[in-house]
Amino acid sequence: MKARLTLKTRFTLVAAGAVAAVALAITAVAFIAIRTDLQNQVRQEIASHAYTAAHEANKYQGHIPAGWVPPHTSGFGVLTQVITSAGAVWAPPGYAGELTPSVAAIDVAAGTGPAFYANAHVNGTTADVLTTRLAPGLAIQVAEPLTSTDAEVARVGATLATLSAIGVVVATVLGWAVARAGLSPVTRLASVAEEVSLTGDPSRRVKVERRDELGRLATTFNAMLSGLQRSLEAQRRLVSDASHELRTPLASLRINVDVLAENPDMPSEDRKEVLDRVTDQVAELGRLVASVTELARGEPPATDMAPVQLGAVAAEALEAARRDWPKTQFIASLNGGVIEGTAERLRVAIKNLLDNAAKFGPPEGPVEVRLTGGELTVRDHGPGIAEEDLPFVFDRFYRALASRSAPGSGLGLAVVREIVACHGGAIAAERAPGGGTVMRLILPCHPFRY
């Protein structure tokens, strides 16, 4: 399995590669420019020698004697010789045979070819040679060894290569330093994420010291951890509160069951009374578990949201409430609109409001239900909610002092608030004029779309 490179290593390699490519391009251009300049200097010297020779030849007015060689044009490594159109070579003493004329050079002497530069081997050394016409039937060749030029080009190339290598090394070191400094927030973020993953404790935070994209990433990560911490704390509170609330009805249910088990000869009237209590306690436990489950569900997935006819949902909830509270009179006016939501959860919320009104109002009611667009009001005519209890009636397991003797777990209104919040709405409890309570539920409503 291939080892994976870290982000810091990849960043460093990319920086080093980019600098190496730029350095290589600059080195190549500089090397070619310097080599061309040195070659041009050599050719200028060769051209100067050729011009001097041609100036000496002008003294003969086109009748250059056989074997003539320009004086003082050879030496210090420079070779000057004359060639004829027949291929004969007139070279200075001691230089004969060192530079053999080519066919192109003979064509220049014959006047059928242009002057040109070419490289040739002179006495085992590479030289740059200029061949140009001197007189009818004659051409002059000037050769200068490239030994010093090649050595200078090699030195320049080595210097440029060394500088490029140093530049790449420096760029690598700087790239590593920049990557280390720039990615340090990511390293800290990864460290915190690993620690949270290992310990399950989301209370750790990443220190934010910058305002760039990495700083925003750290801030967003901290916000995510805060949300996770709140969610876990809410979950723990829910489990703790639910276990506390379940303890009492379970203990009572166990006592009643034990009474039935230990007294098989109990009179039928007493047995019926105990069984009724057991039935009520089981129903209460069912409602409590359903409420806890509803609270634990949280926000529904986006795929569960769809256009919902609020009036139809309210009518179904009202029908269920009339079935559960047959003695209570429900007076309803339903003219609802369409909202984006989950019909099942909205039905639970409205049913909880109706149950709450029937429970705390007079046994016969009435409970007044009015739905207009996305606003639903449910009013009972009971004792109402004390002013000091109004801010807390939607909290989980909260029960006002005056209602603690009534059946229930204190989760119904908390479930309503959770469902309404998931649908982008609001819920409020108000003291009604003349007594009783008004629950006002408002949901975002839009025209029905076919």
Image (spheres, helix red, strand yellow):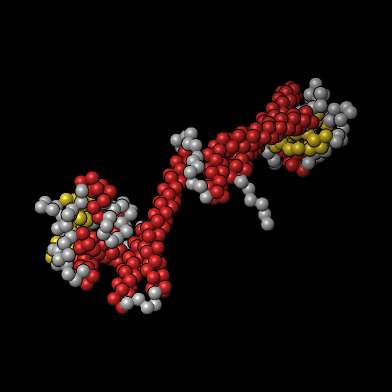
From where the camera sits, is residue 175 visible? Answer: no
Residue at the location (35% across, 62% down)?
Answer: 288
Q: Residue at the location (13% across, 65% down)? A: 331
- Residue furthest to the right in view is 94
Task: Judge left or right: residue 448 versus residue 9.
Answer: left
Closer to the camera in the image, 65 or 409? 409
Residue 164: give x, y in percent of width and height.
67, 34
- For the N terminus, the quadrant is bottom right
Residue 436 position in % (x across, y down): 15, 55
Above or below: residue 360 compared with residue 158:
below
Q: Is residue 213 left or right of residue 411?
A: right
Res. 262 image quadrant: bottom left
Q: Is residue 264 above or below residue 231?
A: below
Q: Nearer the viewer, residue 253 or 437?
A: 253
Specify the farthest residue to the left. 434
Total marks in image: 0
Apparent side of residue 84 relative to residue 31 in the rendered image (left or right)? right
User: Which quadrant of the figure contains the C terminus?
Assistant: bottom left
Please state the horizontal and vertical placement of residue 93, each as a whole percent of the image.
88, 27
The residue nearer to you, when weighing 115 against 443, is: 443
Quadrant location of residue 108?
A: top right
Q: Residue at x 62, y 43 (%)?
A: 9
Q: Is residue 323 above or below residue 425?
A: below
Question: What residue is drawn where x is 44% and y is 47%?
Answer: 229
The answer to whether residue 95 shows anywhere in this view is yes
Image quadrant of residue 15?
top right
Relative depth, front residue between 227 and 364: 364
**x and y percent of residue 91 in the render?**
84, 30
